[in-house]
Amino acid sequence: MESIVSLVLVGTVAVTISGLVLSSLLTSSVARETSEQTVAATERMEALLGQTFESLAMQPGGSTTSSVSGYSTDPYEGDPDRYVRWEIVEDNYQFIHITVVSGWRSTTVASAREVRLETYRKKSE
């Protein structure tokens, strides 16, 4: 009788621990993917901010909701589920609004998600 009780207790503990381990693995995977998206968006934003206003890269256009030639890297690093898109909007004659979105269409552990960075750049810089 004691052995049956101990087996039940060991089984219950094992099931509980395996659930916690699985949860931590999923959380780590989502954190890693989100970090990769943030790095990709930051790299693109830094590249855009390093351009002069006269360069083709800073011309108004693009979209953050769909891939536009010249304003997106899709697929990103050869992965068809990853993309980086940017949009440049001339808000007025003094500022340019830059938005960069890096995302995953689907992942093995979570639904599709995106990282979005936005900034304004004064034209006189």
Image (tube, rainbow, N blue to C red):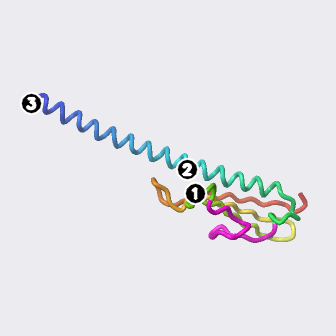
Indicate which disc residue 1 carries.
3
Mark 2: which amino acid? Glu
Q: Vertical placement of 70 versus 31: above or below? A: below
Name the residue at 87% across, 70% down.
93
Image quadrant where one finds the C terminus:
bottom right
The magenta segment = 59-75
Q: Position of residue 74 (x, y in %)?
A: 64, 63
- Nearer the N terminus, badge 2 or badge 1? 2
Work out whether residue 122 or residue 66 is closer to the camera in this orientation and state it: 66
Q: Quadrant of residue 61?
A: bottom right
Q: Vertical placement of 20 versus 115: above or below? A: above
Mark 1: which amino acid? Asp
Residue beneath disc 2: 33
Q: CA distance from mark 1 to mark 3?
A: 56 Å
Name the residue at 62% across, 61% down.
75
Residue 81 shown left or right of residue 39 in the figure = left
Asked if residue 74 is among those painted magenta in the image, a careful observer would answer yes
Residue 61 shown left or right of residue 104 in the figure = right
Q: Are marks 1 and 3 in contact (CB under 8 Å)?
A: no
Q: Position of residue 17 (x, y in %)?
A: 33, 38
- Nearer the N terminus, badge 2 or badge 3? 3
Residue 91 shown left or right of residue 69 in the figure = right
Q: Position of residue 120 (x, y in %)?
A: 78, 61
Task: Look at discs 1 and 3 and give the one toward the viewer.
Answer: 1
In the image as oriented, which residue stretches furthest toward the front? Answer: 78
Q: Main secondary structure of the magenta part?
A: loop
Residue beneath disc 1: 79
Mark 3: which amino acid? Met
Q: Are marks 2 and 1 in contact (CB under 8 Å)?
A: no
